[in-house]
Amino acid sequence: MDPADNGPRLVRLLEEEGLTPAAVLLTHGHYDHILAVPALQERWPELPVYCHPLDVPAKKTERDMGRVFPTVAAFKNLTPLADGQTLDIAGLAIAVLHTPGHTPGSVTFMTGDVLFTGDTLFCRSIGRTDFIGGDDRQMAASLRRLADLPGDFRVLPGHDEATVLSQERRFNPWLQPAG
């Protein structure tokens, strides 16, 4: 999920544990969530990469902070995600929720009692919407969708600490109903 950086180290750790990844799941296409994918695909060439098509740019590289980074478009075995889709990967049923706002193709993955929210929902905060493709209205709708999920979930965001959806409903100002 969102293999962010240090691909050679990640490959080494997986090999040391005798593990072979079944797939790469991307919550969105920003470079700080995808940088290890090339190393993973170099080691495991058939490794599929799942990403929502709205986060697959036309260009295979982008520049930021004077560096050149790969984009999702550069990856082999790219498999599009769709809202409502359920993936069966390594024996896990993983539901895909399209949660745009941080990016047009942001998704949340739901499996069991866990939500992998990428940069949509953080502990007491949310992802930025001021980057290219960000949208405040879409983010508000996505946050409402997550807040309205029945039951409780552990929330594992793309940055910072884990949280619980019930606590976010109660304390996160962006999940509070409009007054």
Image: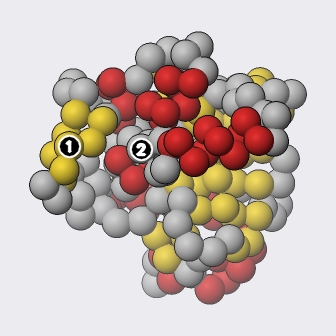
Q: Earlier in the sequence, mark 2 or mark 1?
A: 2
Type of amino acid at the residue the image marks with label 1: Val
**Farthest left residue in view:** 66
In the image, residue 78 lies at what x, y percent?
Answer: 47, 19
In the image, residue 61 lies at what x, y percent?
Answer: 22, 34
How many marks do you count on the picture?
2
66 lies above or below 98 = below
43 lies above or below 67 = above
Tell me which colouring the rendered structure shows: secondary structure
Can you tell which quarter of the image residue 93 is in? top right
CB-based contact (under 8 Å), mark 2 and mark 1? no
Q: Which residue is mark 1?
A: 68
Q: Would residue 169 be seen by someone viewing this image from the given angle?
A: no
- Residue 176's disc number: none
In the image, residue 130 lies at what x, y percent?
Answer: 23, 64
Identified at 58% across, 55% down, the residue is: 117
- Circle 1 — which element? strand
The N terminus: image quadrant: top right
Identified at 69% across, 54% down, the residue is: 115
Identified at 30% across, 36% down, the residue is: 70
- Residue 35's disc number: 2
Number of residues whose C-alpha sits closer than 10 Å to that of mark 2, classed few (under 14), some (14–19) or many (20 or more): many
Left or right of 54, for residue 4: right
